[in-house]
Image (cartoon, rainbow, N blue to C red):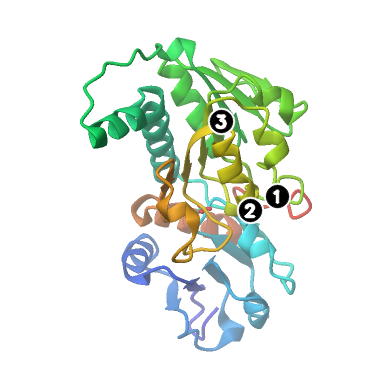
Amino acid sequence: MDAQGKTVVLFACFGVRPEPWLSVLSQAAPDFEWRVWPDAGDKDEVDYVVVWAQPNGFLRQFPNLRAVLCIGAGVDRILEDTDLPDAPIARMRDEGLTQGMVEFVLARVLHYHRLMPAYEAQQREGVWRQLAAPLARDRTVGILGLGQLGAACAASLAANGFQVRGWSRTLKTIPGVASFDGPIEAFLEPCEVVVCLLPLTPATRGILNAGTLSQLWGASLINVGRGAHLVEPDLIPALDAGHLVNATLDVFATEPLPGGHPFWSDPRITVVPHASALTPPATAGPTIVANIRRSLAGETLHDLVDRSAGY
Ligand code: GLV
């Protein structure tokens, strides 16, 4: 709190342009004092930090922190901090972010479902040949992770007629979606398209590897979770062996994907620069302000991170 008794919120989202956020945030809460890192002012006065991709130990420098609000759905980057203060952390659950992910996943699933990579290859060769695509009801799509984003994508794919199965730590009830919590190998086996939307935890790190990918046959992979879900050196061999035919990767072990990395030039792989669902300030700004107001009123934050679960 500052000398005038105003709530002080610091925006410290590394690699994110602050201007579009600040115009929404300050309009949604003109009664707060908004500061933008590195102009944190008196660090004792900082009540809340809106954060993304902070350096290790960053949050520790604010001794009176009441809560941390992440602008992303995945909080693995925050939790990797080995010197994290005890303040509660909220991950982002936002209608605009969810809708963005649903649109991206639907676009990629339909692209693969309707054999667009084959037509693009035919066009490069000047080949005119019609290919029969099955209807969505004869296509099985598997979603790894049925959290806020995975559940919304699963529901949307089911509404578009696909056979949808979802794999998660606990069983979920989503209309039109078969829910599984058993061994991932058995889950993957019938999948023709696999979408990864898991949180990154010790249990899910490297879950897409030579062993699990070998359960698939002629499938397409869409990784919109985290780069570390995939054992990257296992991807091209899985494509070469025919377990996979295509992959869309939005996330990578190292971002930006280094120049010269084999993923850039493999025609079977589509590289997207971690942009499948950018958090839109217009919807997420008011979400953050509402959560801060909850905290100020002494209520528990919405979308509170369970540190022991890792998301
Ligand atoms: C983006 O990666 C997010 O976690 O929302």
* Gap in angstroms between the C-alphas marked 3 and 1: 23 Å
Image spot of residue 93 (x, y percent): 52, 46
Q: Quadrant of the N terminus?
A: bottom right
Residue 71 at least partly seen: yes
Asked if the residue at tag 2 contacts the one at tag 1, i.e. Cβ–Cβ closer than 8 Å, the answer is yes
The residue that label 1 is drawn on is 205
Q: Earlier in the sequence, mark 1 or mark 2?
A: 1
Q: Mark 2 vs mark 3: give the one in front.
A: 3
Tell me if 42 is positioned left or right of 98 in this view.
right
Image spot of residue 71 (x, y percent): 49, 58
Q: Earlier in the sequence, mark 3 or mark 1?
A: 1
* Gap in angstroms between the C-alphas marked 1 and 2: 6 Å
Up the image or down, 47 lies above or below 287; here it is below
Q: Is mark 3 within 8 Å of ligand 1?
A: no
Numbered mark located on residue 242 in the image: 3
The residue that label 2 is drawn on is 228
Tell me if 44 is positioned left or right of 132 in this view.
right
Q: Amino acid at mark 1?
A: Arg
Q: Please name the residue shown 56% across and 45% down the image.
A: 236
Q: Earlier in the sequence, mark 2 or mark 3?
A: 2
Q: Nearer the viewer, residue 96 or 150?
A: 150
Location of residue 89 by image quarter: bottom right
* Callout 3: SS: loop
Location of residue 242 by image quarter: top right
Q: Please name the residue shown 41% across and 56% down the image.
A: 273
Up the image or down, 170 lies above or below 254; here it is above
Q: Mark 3 vs mark 1: give the one in front.
A: 3
* Callout 2: SS: helix
